[in-house]
Amino acid sequence: MWLKLLGKQQKKMYLCKQDILNILNKPDGLFIRPLLNLNQISELTIDFRLGFDFLVSIQGREPFINASKNEDNVGQVSSFFQETRRKLGETFLLHPNQTVLTSSLEYIKLPSDIFAILTMRSSYSRLGLNISSIIQPGYSGCISLELTNNNNNPINLTIGACIFQVRLYRLNDKVNYFAKRRKYICQVRPFVPTMDHDEDLERLNILWKKENNVASLPTII
């Protein structure tokens, strides 16, 4: 008896099609724009489309991409990416072992008690494209994508095609998305990774300077 009662008290973790439709465009619910075709919502997932803007990884002049603050005058991340844009229906050629930063065509706003897991649609995953990411509850903006071609051949992608899907999960409690400092908020196009405001890297940089007797460079105004 108590098992039945416990089961009734627990919320269903994942959302199916009817659950998604029940919260779509409701106050404090799920917001997706533009949703070009309602058939993008299937029984367990929502298909999302490839957007217009790309940051393409290129061979920079610096010897390495600097993901540390210890050598902050060398290997700036932005110098290893080049911006480009396509129109709806045009194509983008992704070369073998190349990584591009892009975003979804759709703008999404998640309720504060629902998070999303991203996966590549099967047809594109079989070509050698993979993605694995989580969207935090309460997030609003276009969905950021990091695409890498693991195939030995270039892959031609169509702008506006449904290439990845989202599965929604409900939490037992609501979460405040802005409870902590966020690097990327309400973005509508891809941005290069930023290490400027990473508090953990700043603490490690101070420790490194102390251990190696490295003096901080004077600020030039």
Image (tube, rainbow, N blue to C red):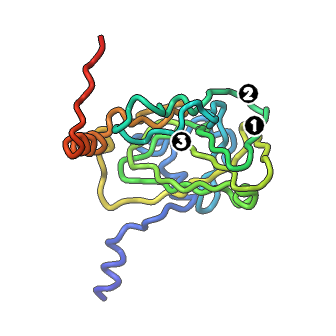
Labels 3 and 2 touching (C-beta < 8 A): no
Residue sitting farthest toward the top: 221
Q: Which residue is found at the position 43% from the left and 42% from the top?
A: 67
Residue 140: x and y, percent? 44, 38
Q: Which residue in the structure is indicated by mark 2?
A: 87
Q: Which residue in the structure is indicated by mark 1?
A: 92
Residue 193: x and y, percent? 46, 37
Callout 2, which amino acid? Lys
Instruction: Single out the mark in the foreground, 1 or 3.
Output: 1
Per the image, label 1 sits on a secondary structure element best described as strand
Answer yes or no: is residue 40 visible.
no
Q: Is residue 7 left or right of residue 107?
A: left
**Nearest to the observer: residue 199 or residue 140:** 199
Residue 89: x and y, percent? 78, 33
Q: Which residue is found at the position 30% from the left and 50% from the top?
A: 175
Task: Please state, as top left, top right, bottom left or bottom right, where the C terminus lies in the image.
Answer: top left
Per the image, label 3 sits on a secondary structure element best described as strand
Per the image, label 2 sits on a secondary structure element best described as loop
